[in-house]
Image (spheres, coloured by chain):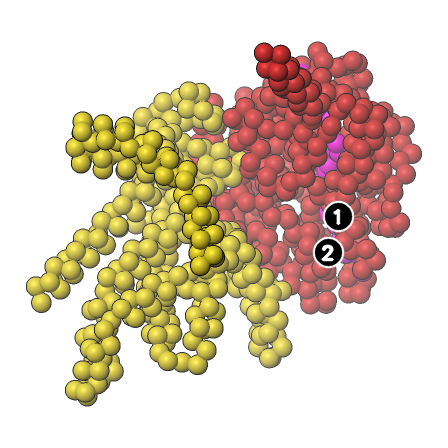
Amino acid sequence: MATRSISSRIGAVLAAPVIWLARLLNLPLKWWQGMTGTGGMAAFFLAPNMAIFGIFVLLPLVINFAYSMTSGQALFLSDRSYVGGEQYARLMDCGNYLDPTTCREDLFWIALRNTALFVVVQVSMMTVVAMITALILNREIRGRGFWRAVFFFPVLLSPVVVGLIWRWILQREGLLNFILYNVGLEPHVWLTDRFYSFVATVGVSVWAHMGFYTLILLAGLQAIPRDLYEAAEMDGTRAGRVFWRITLPLLMPNLLVVIVLALIRAVQIFDEAYVLTGGGPGTSTLYLTQYIYEVGFASLLRNPGLAAAASIIMGLILVVLTLIQLGLGRRNEKAGERK
Amino acid sequence: MNGTKRVLGASFAALLSASAVQAGDVRLMWYSDGVEGEVIQDLLNRFMEENPDINVTLDNVAYKVIMEQLPIQLESGEGPDIARVTNIKELANHWLDLRPLLSDPAYWDTNFGDQFDWMRPDGSDAIPGFLTQLTLTGGFANQTLFEQAGVEMPGEGATWDDWIAASAEVMQSQQTPAAFAIDRSGHRISGPNVSYGANYIGPDGMPAPVDDGTKTFATKLVDWTNEGLMLKDTWVAAAGSTYRAAADDFINAQIPFYYSGSWQVANLSSKIGDGFDWVATGSPCGTAGCSGLKGGAALVAVKYTKNQDDVVKVMEYLSREDVVKEFSERTLFLPAHKGVIEKGGLNWVTEDKNVGPALDAFVKASSETLPAADALPAWVWGNAYYGALVTRISQVMAGEMSLDDAWVRIDQDIADKVAQGN
């Protein structure tokens, strides 16, 4: 009884400033509601979020667009010369869009092509692997909690650390070649091989992020009512049919979230790949974000205007992809409702 | 009322003392190839003992920070008070002209004047700083591997072909992954290019189209890479103009011959120790000469400093003849101070028997550089050329484009950089 009394007193003391603040705000809020109605109140409560969104997302976007219309190496917009759409024209100056060698900014198109290939392969692989892992982790297996932690652990690592770890494994004198040599197999210089370097960036990226997507799918799997499976079992339905007819359709909203998030993340691939392969060999793992980084920040004689134009194009690609995904999602939902 | 006055007075005093501390603060951005970070800290500690009112903070950063982040800080009018940089000509507009602030500008003109054009805008008579070390690109050979292979090391006047042929023999005998490597840098291959007759600078001072000299050496480099003689990891396994040194491969005895520069001497000495014997070879010869490329790291004052007086004191201290001498002796760097060079008698602080002869070899090789190479450190478009060379030659090595396409791309890339820079 005495303990409750002390804790309630502490609670009262802690709550006092909040209550005092609420009372202080009550009067102007009442006045504001009277003036603007409930719509105005919504605007009032949304304003802080909108301000943060505006300052940290919208404003940089506008500034980035302004940069893309300028040229030179100066940092401040006021010191840069306005060139209109010249940077975009330079990026789009191509004889044949499917052949980067015919483009003036061939590295941009190579990076775009590499990114598209990476997205297709990585997102497909990520979705399938995350799905299989989620299905396994959803079963009553021994040490389920431990295995869930194991698969989620790479998500907690910094992308640079992930890149470095795998570089040490795959480099000429790395762990993988050491193992191959010791079991009598021929070592290979993985990171100077175009195919294996690409496979490495895809594989490492899947390894590093799979845990997060597995978790989303696992949540979806656990939300599927058990009685559906029991009914299917009573009917003697085969496991494959259960998966296609029950699990997959009911998991579709989560799957869509996974695909959209994985897709956005894949288009933005940079850190792991940059540390792991540096974009090489040649330009075989040069992705769009690295191209933007190199042009805008890392190259000798930087070109922030061109980098800004490339990033606007990348932003547009992301918007289009997201809209397509959302459109497909809505169509699926409506189809589901009709059924 | 009295209380309020007392509070205000105390606040004012606190503000004054705070601003006094700020006035005595000097930030120095520094990168290290070897042991120079420890040496400069030691020298600065002594300076601070002599000048207790000045606090010099040494920010030890990676070379990448100097190359990628410092230029952006400078463009925004920020940055350290003093910085150690290699990209000295391109950023020349950001350096503080010390001439009107120095107690004895003539001392600087006499001892460091030969390199001022490397670090100031064309046509200016500014004194932005001084070179902490003079560098020269050149080769290193693993003497032990050569001896074990029973291959005689090419002597004076040996060509690039001679060196690669001899290194290839060592590679086969000792089963090393490759015969040689050159750092992934346009600067590094420019000495060899000039040795084959290249001249990057056109008659109007602007970049000239890629000429036969550059084409000859670049073609050799690509062929050697395709034949497995040049270590692929350095050039092929990266994109763009990313810098990569092959020092670790030489240190780990993975290559018998390594082309880099004099700044590696301390690094090799400290990491190889008595692992094997190594020698500096100077630059192998081409058809036009045996040229390396001079360069250096400069300590420059940044014009955005709010503490010019203290910056000048630090710069004057670090440029003193005795300080430069000690810095060079302890870091195993070639000094750029004319007085120190002329007086000679540098006592290199090392027990490594390989170091003295190596530094002597670089001093000797510095007299063999060709005029086309000597013009590059003070040429503002050097980086445009270097970046384009690395990017495109790497693509050829990776099998992505032909050499003929690469020449066209290199000229186009340089033209774009010039258009953007003007």
Does the magenta run of residues contain A108?
A: no
Residue closest to the eye, B210 or A292: A292
Q: Earlier in the sequence, mark 1 or mark 2?
A: 2
Instruction: Examine the residues drawn in magenta and state their main secondary structure.
Output: strand
Is residue A75 rendered to the left or right of residue B267?
left
Q: Secondary structure at mark 2?
A: helix
Residue pointed to by mark 2: B251
Looking at the rendered structure, the kind of residue marked 2 is: Ile
Q: Residue furthest front?
A: A1
Q: Which chain is yellow?
A: A
In this rendering, the answer to whether A87 lies above or below B234 is above
Residue B379 visible, this angle: no
Residue closest to the eye, B37 or A209: A209
In this rendering, the answer to whether A67 lies above or below A174 is above
Is residue B314 rendered to the left or right of residue A90?
right
In this rendering, the answer to whether A181 lies above or below B80 is below
Given the image, what chain letter belongs to the residue carrying mark 2? Answer: B
Q: Residues within 10 Å of mark 1 (few under 14, many from 20)?
A: many
Q: Which chain is red?
A: B
Where residue B418 appears, as percent x and y from the top left, is 48, 28
Q: Are marks 1 and 2 in contact (CB under 8 Å)?
A: yes
Residue depicted at x 72% and y 60%: B253
Q: What range is drawn magenta here?
A: B126-144
Residue closest to the eye, A313 or B73: B73
Where residue A215 appears, as percent x and y from the top left, is 37, 65
Where residue A261 appears, as percent x and y from the top left, is 33, 55
Label at residue B267: 1
Residue depicted at x 64% and y 15%: B6
Given the image, what chain letter belongs to the residue carrying mark 1? Answer: B
Residue depicted at x 25% and y 67%: A251
Where residue A164 appears, as percent x and y from the top left, is 56, 57
